[in-house]
Image (cartoon, rainbow, N blue to C red):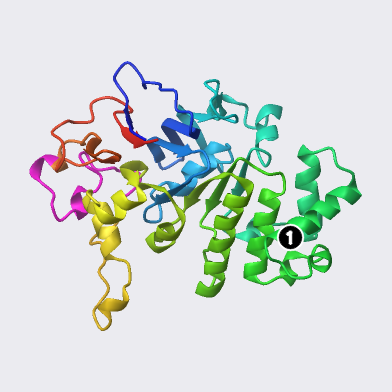
Amino acid sequence: MSFLRSADVGYRRFLMTDRILDIQNLKTYFHTQEGVIRAVDGVYLSVRRRKALGIVGESGCGKSITSLSVLQVIPSPGRIVDGRVLFYPEAESDRPVDLAQLKRHGRELRRIRGKDISLVFQEPMVALSPVYTVGNQIIEALRLHEPHSKRRARELAVEMLDKVGIPNPDVMVDRYTFELSGGMRQRALIAMALVCGPKLLIADEPTTAIDVTIQAQILDLIRSLQTDMDMSVMLITHDLGVIAEMVDDIVVMYLGKVVESGSLHDIFDRASHPYTVALQRSIPRFQRRGQPLEVIRGNVPDPYTRPQGCEFAERCPKAMNRCFQDKPAMAEVGDRHSAKCFLFTDEVESAPGREANVR
């Protein structure tokens, strides 16, 4: 695994037989009456086949919008204005599908949604309909992509509910979402996402609003299903503790941009960007009993008025004068590790997509 760097003439392409998703210079903007919100502003990242990638950062950094952009399910008025989302359905293939170029409601993208790439939304009570039973919703997702009879689809729905750890699946398949606990709803949502055997699962904050015991069960479930189903996972969360248990590679985002990327050990053992270091210090630890929690000073900048220089400069304890004037380019700080900071480079981000990323 090595880094890719874009040049002014465009993004250099390599044959990476282990990748399943390759995002290049993705930009997703929201055009509102107050102005333009650059929710995702030139993101590069890759998901390796049969591996898990974690995307971390504070609320509002663009994690969820990045995941929604993959399948073009961005809420209005958001839209992709630039970039490529290359999906490699087959191993050792150099003919990817650019999901960003497909019609949002077109037949080709609808075939990929739920079949090859599935998305587990943050809140199951919003993602699941309260007027249909859990079984009906799983059956609908299955029959949309597979030529099964209603009877066979119901049998597969029961099997999947059992696989995700729901007790009495033959009974629970006929229950409505409001009859289930939060943990059961989350499992049902995962069952619906996995019933067609996707190659890539995108999980957006899958353990939000769940107690720690159920959280651990959900994470163990996703990890075991990844191994059993031989699939890749993109996990979005603000919780570095969750990331530490689940992923192989990590991307750290801040204000719509990738500020650091590397392997799990790179980020946790050799964190380089001041923002990543601050995130780690804010994790509650048992050894700090009786001490106040560390917090990242200041607030995330107004999305309508971005700073002229580095987006993190106003909150950074190591900011220099040039950090408030220029935007740093992504620099390699290790074999599989990069950070976007003047502490590691003198280069200025002079062209769109001047990035590095893990593959």
From the top left corner, tell me how far across and down residue 66 is, in percent: 47, 42
Q: Is residue 60 magenta?
A: no
Residue 264 vertical position relative to residue 187 in the rendered view, above or below: above
Residue 56 vertical position relative to residue 115 in the rendered view, above or below: below
Residue type at numbered disc 1 = Leu
Where disc 1 sits, the SS reads helix
Relative to 280, 183 lies left or right? right
Relative to 259, 32 lies left or right? right
Provide the residue span drawn in magenta.
302-322
Relative to 273, 179 lies left or right? right
Question: Principal SS element in the magenta part?
Answer: loop
Q: Residue furthest left?
A: 321
Q: Residue at x 71, y 70 (%)?
A: 180
Closer to the camera in the image, 101 or 80: 101
Residue 291 in view here: yes
From the top left corner, tell me how far across and down residue 309 is, in percent: 20, 39
Q: Is residue 320 magenta?
A: yes
Closer to the camera in the image, 112 or 286: 286
The residue singled out by tag 1 in the image is: 161
Closer to the camera in the image, 356 or 122: 356
Label 1: how many Cα within 10 Å (few below 14, some 14–19, many 20+) = many
Q: Residue furthest top?
A: 9
The C terminus lies in quadrant: top left
The image quarter in which residue 176 lies: bottom right
Exactly how many numbered labels are in the figure? 1
Closer to the camera in the image, 224 or 121: 224
Q: Residue at x 66, y 34 (%)?
A: 112
Q: Residue at x 90, y 44 (%)?
A: 149
From the top left corner, tell me how far across and down residue 152 is, in percent: 87, 49
